[in-house]
Amino acid sequence: MPAYDQSRMMKAIRREPVDTTPIWIMRQAGRYLPEYMSVRNRVTFIELCETPELAAEVTLTAQQVLGVDAAILFADLLPMLVPMGIQLTYEKGEGPRIHNPLRTTGQIDQFQELTDLSSLGFVYEAIKLIRRDLPADIPLLGFAGAPFTLASYAIEGGGSKNYIFTKTMMYNDAGAWDAIMSRLTNSISRYLIKQLQEGCQAVQLFDSWAGCLSPDDYRQFVLPYTKRIIDEVSPHGPVINFLTGNPALLPLQREAGGAVMGIDWRVDLRSAWDQFGPEVGVQGNLDPVTLFAEIPVIQQRAEAILQKANGQPGHIFNLGHGVMPDMNPAHVKALVDYVHEAGARFAARQQ
């Protein structure tokens, strides 16, 4: 049995007792880390994503520097859209920009399901390099964007506050919506299964934008597709189902499936876990802005979350979203150290 299979992270995913609460940080390889910036300053963002040796370096360095219990593959949600027919660039200071958003029948017709994964070979090569050099007892997490989040990017052409084009298509043209979501669903499933086959131990599905939806809209327009992905991927490895922005969607998030439910800071962790039930783990859920506070305050707020979890097997500590670019890395490291120290107290109560 591989050493990572008995790591505290994988035990928590399986809801088994651990010596202390495992922690990893969304966007843990990011601009707040000097070690990351020493690499990023030499290349563009997309070059970093598409150069396996560099993606592996920043993934490994972040895990080592922070002492977290899992490495998360350094990649981006959107490059998988490119071989599907999306024209994508990353504009300095503006983030990703899609030049042919899916607004017309012709554009949707040109949006093709991803059947050949060779165009994303840089992702899988990075996975192999990371797994080769990662400590044997540290698992590697892969990830992908959920179909609603990726569809919103592809339809809006970038970030959005109101998702006008996306929701208008949902409401007005069920056929077009199903075509986009079905192609994304099949593509994401293949993409994640391949990540697990190439060396990841678990994967996270990010639905970062689904919080803009009402429960009725999520059930009708999103749930069937997300559930299909999780059902197809889960036999190959555990899935963390991360949804942010709307506590009213928690019951539907649970219905969509996953071994672990990732939650943001807008919901009480104890309340969320009670809604989900004991059959799943819970990941979260410190507000990322907390890390701007003084270290004693960070520790106090982390303690409050650990108290809500109360050492129940299956809790994975994380932020409610990604760490911010101008964060003090010493504060992130202090959080990791404190969760390990305090989490041991709560874990001991379960022995």
Image: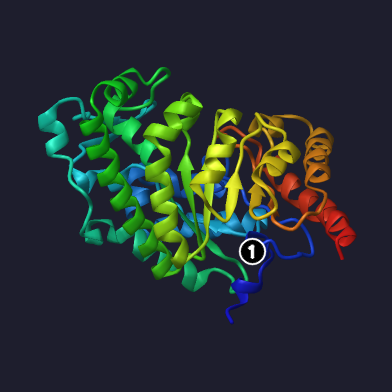
User: Percent position (x, y) of residue 197?
Assistant: 40, 69
Viewer-proximal residue among 140 and 66: 140
Type of amino acid under label 1? Arg
| Residue 8 seen in the current view | yes
Q: Which residue is mark 1?
A: 14
| Residue 330 seen by the camera | no
Reply above or below: 68 against 275.
below
Residue 201, placed above or below residue 343: below
* The N terminus: image quadrant: bottom right
Question: Few, some or many C-alpha atoms within 10 Å of disc 1 (few <14, some 14-19, many ≥20)?
Answer: some
Left or right of 326? Residue 312 is: right
Is 43 situated left or right of 237 in this image?
Answer: left
In the rendered image, residue 108, in percent from the top left (x then y), is placed at 16, 34
Residue pictured at 78% horizontal, 59% vertical: 20
The one nearer the camera, 101 or 232, is 232
- Outermost bottom residue: 1
Residue 248 location, quadrant: top right
Q: Residue at x 55, y 32 (%)?
A: 249
Give the residue displayed 48% in from the left and 35% down from the top. 208
Give the camera-side residue of 90 and 194.
194
Q: How are the colours assigned in the image?
A: rainbow
| Quarter containing the C terminus | bottom right
- Where, by quadrant of the figure, is residue 199 drawn? bottom left
